[in-house]
Image (tube, rainbow, N blue to C red):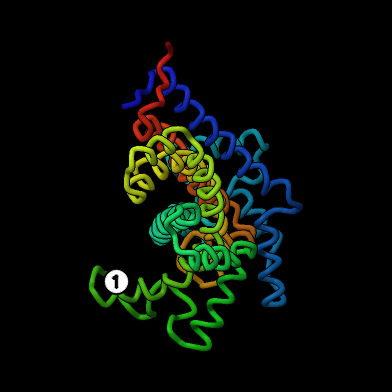
Amino acid sequence: MGSISINYFLRRLLIFFLTIWIAASIIWLIPRLAPGDPVTAMVSRMMRSSGYVENSDKIIEGWKQRFGLNDPLPVQYLRYMGNLLRLDFGYSLAYFPTPVSEIIGMALPWTVGLLLIVVTLTFLIGNFLGAVLVWRGTPRVFKVLIPMGMIFTSIPSILAAIFLIYVFSFLLNWFPMIGAYEQGMTVAFTPQFILSVIKHGTLPALSIIIVSFGYWTLGMRGMMITVEGEDYIQLARAKGLKPSYMLYRYMVRNAILPQITAFAITLGTLVAGQTLVEYVFTYQGMGTIIFNAITTQDFPVIQGTTFILIVMTSLAVLIIDLVYPLIDPRISYERN
């Protein structure tokens, strides 16, 4: 078994918190680089819809004072960082007085559930197909069909979502177009509700899987070709080991290690793709919330949801970095 030194653990932990701090600072800064402010934009939308808002100047000034937008930027930044330590993201500007944490709490389970399914299936399917492409025992027909199946890899997930909606929802009417479950149903762990969630989540998950598994397939194929030329593979063949045993014990186990590292790095890309897919399907996840917050310039919601997604990605990278020596016994972070 590999081992992890205390110095390495503390260094990785420091990088983890440093990454979160830098990301949180960027999240706070970017919305403030945009012209105007969210309160004025919100009142302007109200005026466009109703034609007139009485005492609009007083409303804007009162809301700015309420949310601390008149304070100097350093004061706003320090207050923002202090609130983050308590996971207090403030109140939504568009849905005041609803706390941002409440909005995130309702959407986060849907995003996490969909993300776990998508990541697991994409990783397993992609690496399996990549290994099969190189294995000498694979029938020729599969070596032709697998590359053809990666045609969707070249298109964005949002276009794949629109295509799947048209085929399986509009033409065939097999799956619903929108929502995370049937409207009117009560959220509960009942067979009917679980079946509805699976039915509504199939197309969003498939939209991400079909455009993502190709990257894993190509990566695994390249690693398998490299491993196939190693001396221990030639020795295994000379010893007369079964091809299926060699595929699992010698080739896949060694080729999969760089893929595990890439898994954590590309997790952020999958999250970004899922955000667009959730909006297309009106899925009750973080993606829909982020999109609506951007269109309404709801700074607290943008900051809160993005911060949570960054923490999830950084935490996944940290966990994989720490368990990597346990996966590969040849790796040790102990200093000699």
Residue 203, image x, y percentages: 47, 72
The front one of 233 and 3 is 233
Image quadrant occupied by the C terminus: top left
Residue at the spot 50% in from the left edge and 35% down from the top edge:
82
- Which residue, given by chain and number where applicable, does mark 1 sit on? 194
Give x and y (percent) for residue 116: 40, 55
Q: Name the one closer to the observer, 121 or 188.
A: 121
Instruction: Determine whether the residue tagged by mark 1 lies in a helix, strand or loop.
Output: helix
User: Is 71 positioned to the left or the right of 301 in the image?
Assistant: right
Q: Is residue 215 above or below residue 153?
A: above
The image shows residue 287, relative to residue 168, as above or below, that is above
Residue shown at the point (39%, 41%) measured from the top left: 237
Relative to the observer, which residue lies in front, 156 or 272?
A: 156
Residue type at mark 1?
A: Ile
| Near-viewer residue (98 or 285) | 285
Residue at horizontal 55 percent and vertical 46 percent from the top: 222
Residue 262: x and y in percent read 52, 43
Other residues around mark 1 within 10 Å, as few (<14) / some (14–19) / many (≥20)? some
Measured along the vertical axis of the image, is residue 161 above or below residue 102?
Answer: below
Q: Is residue 262 something one can see in this rendering?
A: yes
Q: Is residue 99 visible?
A: no
- In which quarter of the view is residue 78 placed? top right
The residue at 54%/34% (across/down) is 19
**Residue 295: percent from the left, percent from the top?**
64, 63
Is 138 above or below relative to 11?
Answer: below
Name the image quarter holding residue 184: bottom left
Query: What residue occupies the far right of the structure in this picture?
Result: 35
